[in-house]
Every structure is written in structure tokens, then in C-alpha cells.
Image: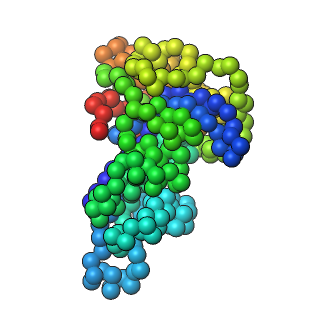
Amino acid sequence: MILYPNCKINLGLRVVRKRQDGYHDLETIFVPIYGLHDELEVRPLTQTEQKTQHTDQFTFEQEGLVVDCNPEDNLIIKCYRNMVQKYPAIGNVSIRFKKNIPFGAGLGGGSSDAAHMAIALNELFELGLSKQQLTEEVRTLGADCPFFIYNTPCYAEGIGDKLTPIDLDLKGTRIILVKPDEGVSTKEAYSGLQIKDGVERISNKDKKVSADSMRNGSFINDFEASVFPNHPIIAEIKKRLLDAGAYYASMSGSGSTVFGLFKKDSESCTNAKLRTLKEEFASMILLDDTFGEWKS
């Protein structure tokens, strides 16, 4: 079985409060981006392979971007270890993983990998777990993990794990993702964060979100205030996207990826500013795509 763990962007991200457990409550809208994805192949090991390779549970082969951690710390392996302890039906597996989504990018790549591993195990070994049950399996691996089980536009609350599917209309919108060479750790983004009382919150879980509604002042990423001073290139990319005609531009999550949304049928998609931007940031642009139908 081959799956393609995709990334996400955040439309707005308001940090509401710090919790007693050290985490933060937030509001955001998660939007899946299918055009940029990793590759995950999972299959049961044959008896011959198990005898030949002397494996106890799995083999793991990784390609693409180098994941600089012990395989046991990879969220894919952590997901497998957690689930194999709970479900005896899960057998030994071969895992081939190609990493394309960059790290420190605010795109949720690792969380997506873990969620898709849970989906693969559920289908391969016919566990019969519902989406709600799968979210419980991956919740402890990362706050973004439950979103990738549903993988459709969602309003998120709590630490990002309380999800409400929303009606998001971005048809005819072109998205450009720009990832500078430098990354931003979640710890760094939170360290400079100042939580303000009385700010306008997103609160769009019961509303239709469209290009027009995104022009109001509530779709703000609070992390930009703490990240931009230390990473001026990220602020510059956002400015250049807006100058090129984006009707909305923002850093995604805790950064460092910035995205711009453009009206596909507007002149801004072909104007000189956009062409100049794409030439200047060619090595940083990860995706230039158009939103289509959301997967269910």
C-alpha cells in the first residue's frame, strides 16, 4: 500500500491562552495541501523476508530529505510501535518512506506521516477503526496529527486537536508556497510569543470561509510577531507576495513557510511582479498550484 502524506497550511492562527499543562489553546483553520506530499509505502513482510532479514517487527528504508533523528524517534515508527502493542492483528511490515515536505516549515509533515501510517495499518490489517478511533491513536504523537486523519478543511480549537469541518470555498484560487532555507522551531516561535487579551479571534467554525471573508482582520497568525524580527527573510517573502497581488498571505503555523493566495483569473497571476518574485525566490518556491475539490 502506498500513501501520500500531504502537508497543510493555517488560515489564521490565534494563540488564546497558556494552559496549566504547559501547552497553549489556539484557534486556527487547517487546510490540506495535496500537491506537496511525502511518500509512504507499507506492506506486510513475507515469512521468507522475516527469516532472511532476521527482523522482529519491521524494516525501514528512508529516502529524500534526510531525517536527522534515530529511526525510533520518527513519528512513523512511534505510531507503529504504539499500535502494534494494542492490536495483535498487526503483523511485521516493510516501510519505505520518502521525505519531500521540509522540516521547520509549519506544514505539519511529520504529523501527516504519523496519521497516514495509522491509516495504512488500519486498512492493511483490517482493524476496522473509525476516523474518531484513529484520531485517538495518533493524538499523543502530535497536536496536528488528528487533523490529517480527516484531511479536509477544519476549524481547530484546544491545542489544535478539537476539529470541526468547515465549508471552505477557495475554488479558482492559486496558491504559492515559499520556504526559505532557514527553519523555525516550534520552541523558538513560542518563546517570543506575547498573548494579548481582547484580540479578535477567528471563530469561523459555523461560517463559510471564502476569499472575501479572509480579507477581514481576524485571519492573523500570532507567531508572525515573534518570528519576523529574528527571520527578516520570512517577513520579506510575505511582503513580496502581497506586492505581487496576493489577496491574502501569511506564514503557515510557526513558520518558516509563507503562502500567498491569488485569484486565478486575475491579472495578478501573470503580472511582472509575480514573475519577478518567482525568479528571485525560485529555489524557495515549493508549490505553485490551484485549489480543487477537497478529498473526503
197 above or below 192?
A: above
Q: Is residue 245 left or right of residue 251?
A: left
Q: Which residue is rendered at x = 55% and y = 60% of the image?
A: 68
Q: Which residue is rendered at x = 53% and y = 54% of the image?
A: 140
x and y percent of residue 274 in the render? Answer: 43, 22
Q: Which sits in the foreground, 35 or 171?
A: 171
Q: Is residue 29 left or right of residue 87?
A: right
278 above or below 109?
A: above
Q: Is residue 199 visible?
A: yes
109 above or below 12?
A: below
x and y percent of residue 230 in the render? Answer: 69, 35
Q: Which quadrant is home to the C terminus? A: top left
Label tally: 0
x and y percent of residue 92 in the render? Answer: 35, 74
Where, by quadrant of the figure, is residue 187 drawn? top right
Q: Is the image coloured rainbow, by chain, by secondary structure, or in one colour?
A: rainbow
Q: Which residue is rendered at x = 68% and y = 40% of the image?
A: 19
x and y percent of residue 75 in the render? Answer: 49, 58
Q: Which sits in the foreground, 165 or 68?
A: 165
Q: Is residue 33 visible?
A: no
67 above or below 58?
A: above
Q: Which residue is rendered at x = 37% and y = 42% of the image?
A: 150
Q: Which sits in the foreground, 220 or 145?
A: 145
Q: Which quadrant is home to the N terminus? A: bottom left
Q: Which sits in the foreground, 127 or 98?
A: 127
